[in-house]
Amino acid sequence: MICSYKEIPARIAATGSYLPERVVTNHEIPGLEETNGAVERLLGAVERRAAGEDETCSDLIVKAARRVLEAAEASPSDLDQIIVSATPGDYFEPCTASVVQHKLGAQCAAVDIGMSCVGWLAGLDYALKSVACGAKKVLVMAGTVVSKGPAFYNPMRRAIFGDGAGGALLERCEGPGHFLAGGLWTDGQYHDMITMPHLASVPTGRVPEEYRGSFFMGDARIIHQALKDNLPPGLEQTLALAGVAREDLDVAFIHQPSKPLFELAVRASKVPREKLVEDYARYGNTISAELPISLDENVKSGRIKRGDTILKISFGAGFSGG
């Protein structure tokens, strides 16, 4: 559903991100020691970050959240709500947001949001509606730690992903809000085309035997078609409702799950190339944390300034998008 945010008195007060210190090159991934550049050529990945042995997903998120709050000159006690997209979280239960709340020393409600790579955008949508209902400060964070555990049967698919965290503080503002329009979509018939199972998962017939219990990505043609069917109409509705033309955009972020999918999304979106942020080679696919990490880096570098018009697009397992 695409909706207008123009009447919601909200703005991004500050951004923040955190990337683990350890850099993992393609040749350091077991099974890809002798790839002769195949990973970079096929996927576009050169390196990615990996969390330390004792670092949890909530640890990464808290480090990023502290940077957000410091930049906003805000305290954890000021927060009305914490929204977290964690892939995977610290536990199946409880929600990782509750761990983040405790480590930050906040006293507000804390909730997890799924939706895979779209999780942070879904968190923004939820946060805006909370502000519309009276919330004054909502922390929206995302993090991922995929470098641990035997989650990948195919080492090439392990090379797609990296660890990291990022987020933003939404706050109530005077006068008209700074958000124009947005929304989310899901095409659930493809829910089993990209899967990361847990202990209680029962695989469908689309998942080959060798991938059961590990990350699986199905027929690329089906995934590409789902993206081409859903992204263009959703984007056109959003731009029309916002009253923004592609030429009006200052910076555009399009999710970079891999080089082929990113290029397909660029073509489907018809966003001018010079407006795009491209940083997949350095960090890989950090799932829902990718957009807030990139947003923060471009704010810090000065590429994004107050008053700029920004487009954020993400898509992933589900099959979902925003």
Image (spheres, rainbow, N blue to C red):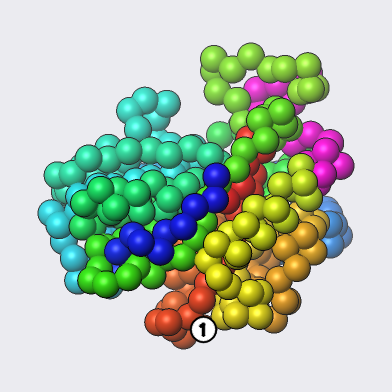
Q: Assess whether residue 239 is covered by the magenta stretch.
A: no
Image quadrant in which you'd find residue 318: top right
Residue 28 visible in image = no
x%, y% of residue 273?
Answer: 73, 76
Find the magenta span and give its range.
209-225
- The reply to whether the magenta stretch includes residue 213 is yes
Query: Based on the displayed image, in which of its 4 quarters is residue 208 positioned?
Result: top right
| Quadrant placement of the N terminus | top right
Q: Is residue 134 left or right of residue 41?
A: left
Please tell me in which quadrant of the rendered image residue 244 appears. bottom right
Residue 300, given in percent of the width and then of the height, sits at 43, 79
Q: Position of residue 203 (x, y in %)?
A: 68, 17
| Image mark count | 1
When the figure is inspected, residue 218 is found, relative to residue 301, above or below; the finding is above
Q: Residue at x 58, y 59 (%)?
A: 238
Report the front residue among 185 and 50: 185
Is residue 207 left or right of 256 when viewed as pictured?
right
Position of 78 relative to 208 (above/below)? below
Residue carrying label 1: 303
Q: Position of residue 264 (x, y in %)?
A: 79, 58
Answer whether residue 155 is visible to the viewer in this image: yes
* Identity of the residue drawn at 71% across and 71% down: 271
Q: Residue placed at 34% from the left, 49% from the top? A: 129
Using residue 277 as the reference point, say whether residue 32 is left or right of it: right
Residue placed most toward the observer, 285 or 304: 304
Considering only vertical position in the picture, is 299 above or below 123?
Answer: below
Secondary structure of the residue carrying numbered label 1: loop
Three-letter code for the amino acid on which mark 1 is drawn: Arg
